[in-house]
Amino acid sequence: MGLAETGTRTTEALDPFGYATHEVLNQPPPLADYDAFGTDPVLPTIVRTFGAEWAKERLHEAGKVVGSAHVQELARQANRNLPELRTHDRFGHRVDRVDFHPAWHELMGLAIRHDTHALCWNDPRPGAQVARAALSYLWNQGENGICCPIGMTYSAVPILREDPARWAEWGKLVTSTAYDRRQIRAADKTGATVGMAMTEKQGGSDLRQTQTRALPNGDGTWSLVGHKWFFSVPHSDVFLTLARTPEGVSCFVVAGWLPDGSRNRLQVQRLKDKCGNKSNASSEVEFRGAIAHLIGEPGHGIRTGLRMNHYTRLDFAVGSAGLMRQAVAQAAHHVANRRAFQRALIDQPIMANVVADLALEAEAAAWLSFRFCAALDREKESESERLLGRIGAPIAKYWVCKRVPAVVVEALECHGGNGFIEDHLMARLYREAPLNGIWEGTGNVICLDVLRSMERTPDCVPALLDELRLARGADRRYDAELEALERDLLDIARQEGQARRFVERLAIMASAGLLLRHAPPSVADAFIATRVAGGYAGHFGDLPSGIDAGATARRAVPTLY
């Protein structure tokens, strides 16, 4: 029997009707139906280190949901079937509602049921901020779009709590674990989400340029007149915004629907056609006498908003670390299950170097982000932790959000062309990756905030240096860079043009110190050899000889059920 005949008979045996022309070989199985928490090489250790191990069972449950094929399909549907703006109903009445695919609502319901938006407020025991951040880290691997309303709802709670009347109105709803998709008045709902509308056309990040006006109604409410260039989640039940009073820019709480059931007096002009974050609605709106309540001191609205931003910036750092983990997990799974040149790709030295380097970046990002979430847990008992968190949040936000696009691009390349098609979730991660670096302050704004924190709260500097010194003596290369940083600190901080490089040094050293104290020695050694010891190009696959890249790469591979 000839070889050709053998091949023909094999094909016929596979498909006697001639539908398939060939057998599909050497394609990895989908990375699905796994525990995204349990198979993460670093997150369980972080949770244990920072006192949140009591949430382990909840995190395993969330990890299995996030890692399921079902959630992956919901995410795909939510990003293919985009939100639609309905300005009017069929009778011509103005309604300004946003319609979503059912997949969006199911994803929101799952994440809110896990208490991703409010665990730390509903169960404020030690480690609660870290536990909630772990849920956010996991759900950012499931679907990033829903994490916008989830994160804003989380961040708004401390602000709403400052006003007893607003907290009585909204507290129970925004901390509820029952998701209510209906766009109706709050009195008829079982749960609520929070949005933000701060940015205007002329100002961007410069909120002092706010033009929207607030006019007193004489009954304790205000009417807002103006516009917002970016209003995320315009269908939110309540949102925070800025408007100008006689005292200056002030912060307001605005209900989406009025007590009589009518839409509050805002008009959604259009939904933004964004590069990524497609499942989530972002909009431009005009306020035409929107009824609002003042929150915080008149004329100090930016300060009130920045207190909320402290939480959102940390959540963006955590979310970007989660996005990194998803990208690295996808790449590691792919190269572990695909062969080339008689070996699994992960066993090819050059590929092992790339995946190991990606894994180092993701692990460092996770430690950096969660360390400052832990500071939130401890700030009431420790002034040094409060100070550390003040300077640490913008450091983590800048660096982790800045690094995630590079990680995603390299992880996508590990898949070859298959990673660049829309059927693969890597394409969605690619579009998503730059976003957190823009929201709540671009890179320049965030780096300047680090300098501002050093100027206005100078005790932040010794708090940060004390944190870095905890790892002193563990590695001579780290010690040398710490000594140089201490020497250069005040001089560099005065040079605004060098702010990015300065914050990068702080972020890398904080990450290195955490890895030295908590990670496997091989991980800390590889990170310091490439990021601290000099000559770091920012690319991946640069691990020097002597580093066991294969073991680090294998450690990143998720285990399927």
Image (cartoon, rainbow, N blue to C red):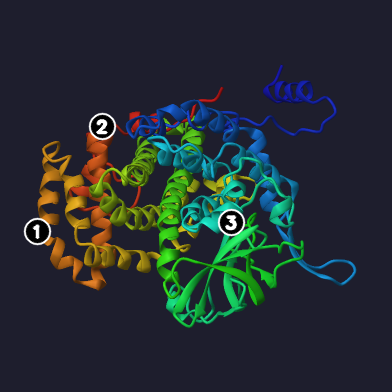
Is there CB contact under 8 Å for labels 1 and 3? Answer: no
> Can residue 408 be seen at all in this image of the molecule?
yes
Q: Residue at x 71, y 16 (%)?
A: 1
**How far across and how far down the image is residue 222, in percent?**
60, 74
Q: Are marks 2 and 1 in contact (CB under 8 Å)?
A: no
In the picture, measured across the screen, residue 355 lies left or right of residue 465, that is right
Q: Provide the residue designation for mark 1.
A: 487
Find residue 522 and name its label: 2
Q: Earlier in the sequence, mark 2 or mark 3?
A: 3
Q: Amino acid at mark 2?
A: Ser
Q: Around disc 3, counting alpha carbons within 10 Å, would you say few (fewer than 14), some (14 to 19), or many (20 or more)?
A: many
The amino acid beneath tag 3 is Val
Q: What's the mark number on residue 525?
A: none
User: Which structural element holds mark 1?
Assistant: helix
Q: Which mark is residue 194?
A: 3
Mark nearer the N terminus (1 vs 3): 3
- Residue 343: tell me if it is visible: no
How many neighbours does mark 2 have within 10 angstroms: few (below 14), some (14-19), or many (20 or more)? Answer: some
Q: Quadrant of residue 178?
A: top right
At 56% from the left and 22% from the top, the residue drawn is 561
Q: Circles 2 and 3: CB distance less than 8 Å?
A: no
Q: Nearer the viewer, residue 139 or 22?
A: 139
Mark 1: give few (<14), some (14-19) or many (20+) Cα within 10 Å: few
Q: Earlier in the sequence, mark 2 or mark 1?
A: 1
